[in-house]
Image (cartoon, rainbow, N blue to C red):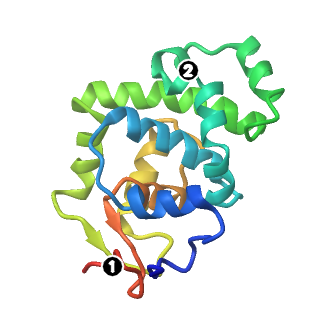
Amino acid sequence: MNKKRCAWCNMKNPSYIKYHDCEWCVQNRDDKYLYEMLILESFQAGLSWECVLNKREAFRLAYDNFDIDKVCSYGDEKICELLGNTDIIRNRLKIKASINNSIVFKEIAKEFGSFYDYLRSFAGKNIIYETGKTTNGLSDTVSADLQKRGMKFVGSTIIYSYLQATGFIYSHDKDCFLYKN
């Protein structure tokens, strides 16, 4: 029997179905995962999440399995390599931002003990249950703080999507088999 899923889930894409069913809106406290998702979400700006998700494994290879210390040290040679990699999204501004955002991510994690604790400092202990939105007060606040700290490609819509992806906001459609309120 076919399970009913959120309307955005492309039922012809097995990796998208798996992402929807097993990952999206599932709370994850692991900073390595939170870091990977933040970098991937920043590449989504102006594109679909499905496009980014389809390139996720290529991003993992290109970005040294999201080893934050390695990414923080990327220089011009690595930027040129990434710009030449046809398997990832090759946007110079996003690539440079991903390196800069990695440095800021590390600084935040050091300041708060973890990036998860940083996010919790805004979100509190409760999960937000809502559907049909692309921004909210939480995403506005986190986005503004990340931008103040120097991150790029972290507007409120990207951060809202990130907070959904990492389980701070739970947004499965009412028709979806994973819906809760």
Position of 84 compared to 16: left or right?
right
**Quarter of the rendering containing residue 168:** bottom left
Residue occupied by mark 1: 179
Viewer-nearest residue: 127 or 141: 127
Residue 163 seen anywhere in this rendered image of the structure: no
Viewer-nearest residue: 6 or 126: 6
**Quarter of the rendering containing residue 123:** bottom left
**Mark 2, residues whose alpha carbon is within 10 Å: few (<14), some, or many (≥20)?**
many
Q: Residue at x 26, y 43 (%)?
A: 29
Residue 12's spot in the image, x, y percent? 66, 68
Amino acid on which the number 1 mark rests in the picture: Tyr
> Is the Cβ of the residue at disc 2 closer than 8 Å to that at disc 1?
no
Residue lying at the far bottom in this picture: please name it: 175
Q: Residue at x 74, y 26 (%)?
A: 82
Residue occupied by mark 2: 71
Q: Residue at x 34, y 74 (%)?
A: 178
Q: Residue at x 18, y 57 (%)?
A: 124
What is the distance, in whole Å, between disc 2 and disc 1 at their CAs? 36 Å
**Mark 1, residues whose alpha carbon is within 10 Å: few (<14), some, or many (≥20)?**
some
SS at mark 2?
helix
Pick whichever of labels 2 and 1 is earlier in the sequence: 2
Position of 49 compared to 176: left or right?
right
Residue lying at the far left in this picture: please name it: 125
SS at mark 1?
loop
Viewer-nearest residue: 95 or 151: 95
Amino acid on which the number 2 mark rests in the picture: Val
Residue lying at the far front in this picture: please name it: 1
Q: Which quadrant would the N terminus be assigned to in this image? A: bottom left
Position of 48 compared to 16: left or right?
right
**Mark closer to the observer (2, 1):** 1
